[in-house]
Image (spheres, grey):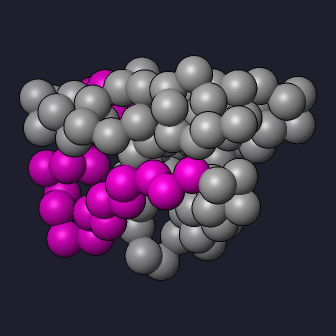
Amino acid sequence: MDKVKALASKNAAVIFTKSSCCMCHSIKALFYDLGASPAVHEVDHDADMEWALRRQGCNPAFPAVFIGGKYIGSAKDVISLHADGSLKQKLIDARAIWF
């Protein structure tokens, strides 16, 4: 769990993904479209990381999105934030994008 916290706090925006997850790809594309360059950690071959994410409260585990070191949620949560306009502000506040 410490590894998740350490990785999540190193960058303004962090996404834990699996390469076979279509929602992971969509969330990465959304961040890029908003002008963010998130740190992306593909954990396809790291079962310990998946369990650490689940213990952190990330369910479903992928994608697991962190902004400013705080867990934001999975794809559903990120899309909801984007729909109500608050995702962009969270990225600005965390200095993942500048406007």
User: Quadrant of the image for the C terminus?
Assistant: top right
Q: Position of residue 94 (x, y in %)?
A: 50, 26
The stretch in magenta equals 36-58
Q: Say which residue appears at 49% left-offset and 57% top-offset.
A: 37
Instruction: Measuring from the top left, give residue 59's x and y in whole percent.
Output: 48, 36
The residue most toward the bottom is: 20
Task: Please indicate whether residue 45 sits to the left or right of residue 59 in the image.
Answer: left
User: Does residue 73 appear in the picture of this structure?
Assistant: no
Question: Residue shown at 33%/40% (left/top)?
Answer: 11
Label total for image: 0
Q: Note whether 33 is above or below 59 in the view shown.
A: below
Q: Is residue 93 above or below residue 62?
A: above
Magenta stretch: residue 34 in it? Answer: no
Q: Residue at x 62, y 30 (%)?
A: 92
Q: Please state the horizontal and vertical placement of residue 53, each as a whole percent of the image.
A: 30, 38
Q: Is residue 12 visible?
A: yes
Is residue 19 depicted above or below 53 in this figure? below
**57 or 28: which is nearer to us?**
28
Residue projecting furthest to the right: 84
Between 37 and 50, the one lying in front of the other is: 37
Could you tell me which quadrant the N terminus lies in? top left
Camera-side residue of 60 and 67: 67
**Picture quadrant of residue 88:** top right
Judge left or right: residue 20 versus residue 54. right
Q: Quadrant of residue 45?
A: bottom left
Is residue 45 toward the left or the right of residue 23 in the image?
left
Position of residue 35 in the picture relative to residue 1 (left or right) = right
User: What's the residue at 45%, 41% (across, down)?
Assistant: 13
